[in-house]
Structures are given as structure tokens and as C-alpha cells.
Image (cartoon, coloured by chain):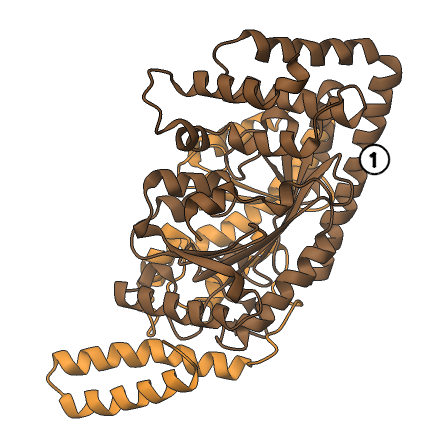
Amino acid sequence: MTIDELVQSQREWLRNDGPESSIVVSSRIRLARNLAAFPFISKLSEEDRRRVIETLRKAVRKTTFGQNCTLFSMNDLSSLDRKLLVECHLISRELADAEGLRSAMISANGQFSLMFIEEDHLRMQCIKSGFCLSEVWREINELDDQIEKNAVYAWNRKLGYLTACPTNVGTGMRVSVMLHLPALGLTRQFTKVHNSLQKISLTVRGLYGEGSQAWGDFYQISNQVTLGVTEEELIQQVQDVVRAVIGYEEKAREFLLTENRERLENGISECLRMIRNSSEMKPQPTLQCLSAIRLGINLGLVSDIPIETVNQLMLQIQPAYLQWIYGGVESSLDGNEFRSQYLKKHLLKILG
Amino acid sequence: MKCQKCDKKAVLHLSDLTGGKPVEIHLCAEHAQEYLSQNQGGAQEQVNMASALATHLAQQMAFTKASNEFSKTDQETCPMCGITFFEFRTSSKFGCPNDYEVFSRQLLPMLMNIHGEERHTGKAPKHSSEETSQKLAELIHMRQEMAEAISNENYEKASVLRDQIKQRESEAGIA
């Protein structure tokens, strides 16, 4: 499978068929692991990097998942290809921007991706549509067990899985749920939620993780602590909080629908008008428009367009994707103009 | 570790205990000052902050005390990977699994600061044990020893080490 095929192929987690998917876009778990026989990344020679990748590649190939995925060596990819993978949430920005030998193994539907030589020897993630952390955990746990059959991890009873940075030691697990919370945004209640989350040591981030902004009311809630709690407890913690946040968002949506329906409808029309009439669209207003349309579909105010299309547009309006689509076209248009064209083309049905 | 408000190095590491459960705070010198002066607000808050700060400062004192010993501590080196504590302190990344053991004294307050816990209670590998993991970690040192033996032209020692390394690696499925 080539990068082009991978980018074009349907991503399972955007399908919007998971539980609670009107509010929860996706559930994701990542595990950090290191091979016992090699130093961590900072002390790894180029030759050892090659051997770590090779050992992990072999171990992953022997798993049931391994036959169905492709290995990409970062040094063989263009910078645009690497950016595309970041935008698709398949690799981290750190892996894309680093130097030296490093690779990623990615499944065709984008559900699993394993990064070799990121901050740790192995960072694997499983991502699925909707609110289904237990299912995601079952799958990635199974993959972890299968890999570990053929590769001995750095682990001890006292501290668990040993990672390059002590902030990940223990379970090496980051549980992360991507939420769409437009009604909490509109009713200005998100700050309250945000503050209460911080008090229980959960983190809230934007669409693209650390350092990214929460444009379009898309947020990721994840755990911070990795030591002294079991994987199941961590999942439970995040699950409980997310369930509460879903409840708040539902109440806020209900309130908007009964008390403020006109304002909602006007807001959506305004967004559609903006897409129709502008010849340039910047990323932030675009995500705000997509957010309003997504809310509109979920509340039955917008029809004729599946949510899946809006989910996909969230990634497709990112700079590298647009460059990939329009790159071959001789043109003087810039990214914002391409974005505008792309949106018009894909939202034709509802733009009228 | 970086300051949570900017890219500078964090010098103040606190656990804010005012909210019931500890919230970690990592700030550079500048933002630490801002944080401390900001939190001298309302009377009620001041009481809470005062007690919290007392705790923090006690922790920081322990840290500072440690920092006075840093010149000595900084030189401490892991015999396996060769990383010094100074290198770890400045990059917040360890060099090998053995560092958790070598620097365990300095690590403990850090783990309590980050996680509020010091013991793993989660998953264990199904197909290997702590002992296998530790035995394989010795390879890191053995490879270094072999390289040293070669550079000292002690080829006899190097070849013995090479055979031992090869055997252990092939048993563990290392490429």
C-alpha cells in the first residue's frame, strides 16, 4: 500500500458509526514500549536504530494484525507525505519532524498505527469511531500481547513498562477521546468543564493534541497519570468523565433547540452563506463552519449530508491534504482558495 | 521538563493541592514568579494557598537541598548507557532501562510529583518476566564492553563477549 492509497482509503474511525458518535468523534489508546535489550532513543546508535526497527517489524509481522499493514520508513517519505500522515492522525508530529532512521507500520483502514523510534522504541495506537474505549483497549491489549511474544519489553514489577520519559512510566498508556462540544461552546459553559477536568488530572487538548488549538469545538480529553493505576482504572476514569461531559453537551443541545432554535438555524445559515460566498477560507473559520454543520445534522436542522462527510472534511481541509489534492494543478491559487473550492465541491448539496 | 506556559525550562515543580486532588504545575522562573504573586489574592484563597505553598516550598526545599548536592549528583553515571544525571536533568529523558535503578533516589520525588504514586499496579507481560528483561538489558553494557575491548586491541576478550552477546540476542529474537 502506498501513501496515496492509504490517504485515499476510508478511515474506519471517521465513519461515525460508533456509540455516541453525535458527540464522541473517536476513542484512542496509545501504548509506549521499549525493547529491553537496547538503550532508549537518546543513546541509540544508527545501527541500533536499524536493529530495533527490524526486531519490532519482525515481531509485528508475526501478529494477526501484522499481515494487514504497511511499513513506511520516514526517510523514504517526502515532507508532504509525512505531514499528510500527521494530519490523518496516523503518526505524531515528533516522528514526522525527527531525524535518523524511524518508521511507522499502519493498517489499511487506519485503525492501528505503530511508530518505531519515536520518543520510545515503540508507540502503538488503536483508534475507533465513537465512544468505545473498552473495545479499543481489548484490541490494542491483544496486539501488545502478540508483539510481546516475540520481543522482550523493558519492564519490572515495581515500575511497570519503562519509558524514556518518567511521565509515561507504568502503564505507558494514554487514553484519549475526541469530543465535539459545540453546544457547550455556544452556551459558554466549556470553561467550567475545562476547569473541573484539570482538577482531576485529565488533560484537554485541541484537534491535533499537544499545543494545538480547540478550533471548531473539537476537544481531546486524556489521562495524564500513567503510574499506580491499572489500565482498566485509567479507562474507567476517562470514561466516567466523558460520560458526564456528554450529559452536559446533550443538555446544552436540548436547551439550544428549545430555547434558541432560531439563533441556531441562523448560525448554520450564516456558515453556509460564508462557504458559498467566500473565495478564500482560512482553517479556523472553516472548522467553525464544519462544527456548526455537524451540530445542525445531529439536531436534524441540516439534511442531505452524512456526518461522515463532515468528519472527513475536518481532515481534508488541513494544509497538507489540500496541497496533496491540488499540488499537481498549475495554479496561482493559495491554500485558502483551494480550501474554499474543496468545501464548495463537497458541500454542494447543502449549499444549494 | 518544559514550562507549561512557554518553552523555557521549568524550575518550579508543584502539586497544587487546593482542589482536593493534586494538580501538577511546572513553571519557568518567570512564570513561577507570576504564579506565586497571582495567588496572593482573596483572603480565603490566601489561606489555602498559604498552606499549599508551605507544602510546595517544603518539597522545593527538599529539591533545593538536592540541588546543592547536584554537583556531586550530576556526575553520577549509569554504568550501562553512560548517561549522567545532569544529562537526564536537562533533557528529562533517560538513556536506558537501568537508569530507573541507578537514579532511583532522585526519581522517587519526581514520580510522586508527576503521578502521585510510586508503584505500578497495571499490566505485566504475559510471555516474559522482570528477570528476562533485566538479563537482556545487560546486553547494553556488554556491547559497550566489547567495543572497548576492540579499541584496546583485547581481541580475545572481544570475541568471547561477541559470542555471548550473539547467543543472548538470538535467544531473544533480536534482529
At a point 64% along the width and 45% down the height, the residue shown is A13
* Label 1: few (<14), some (14–19) or many (≥20) C-alpha neighbours in 10 Å: few
Helix, strand or loop status at disc 1:
helix
- Residue A183, visible in the rendered structure: no
Q: Is residue B80 above or below residue A264?
A: below
Report whether B145 appears left or right of B127: left
In this rendering, the answer to whether A194 lies above or below B20 is above
Identify the residue at horizontal 51%, vertical 27% (top origin): A317
- List the single residue furthest toward the left: B153
Palette colour of chain B: orange
- Name the tint of chain A in the rendering: brown
The answer to which of A121 and B149 lies nearer the viewer is A121
Q: What residue is drawn where x is 38% and y is 18%?
A: A334
Above or below residue B48? Residue B79 is below
Task: Return the residue nearer the eye: A117 or B81.
Answer: A117
Which residue position holds label 1? A247
Percent x, y of residue A337: 44, 16
- Measuring from the top left, give residue A300's x and y in whole percent: 81, 23
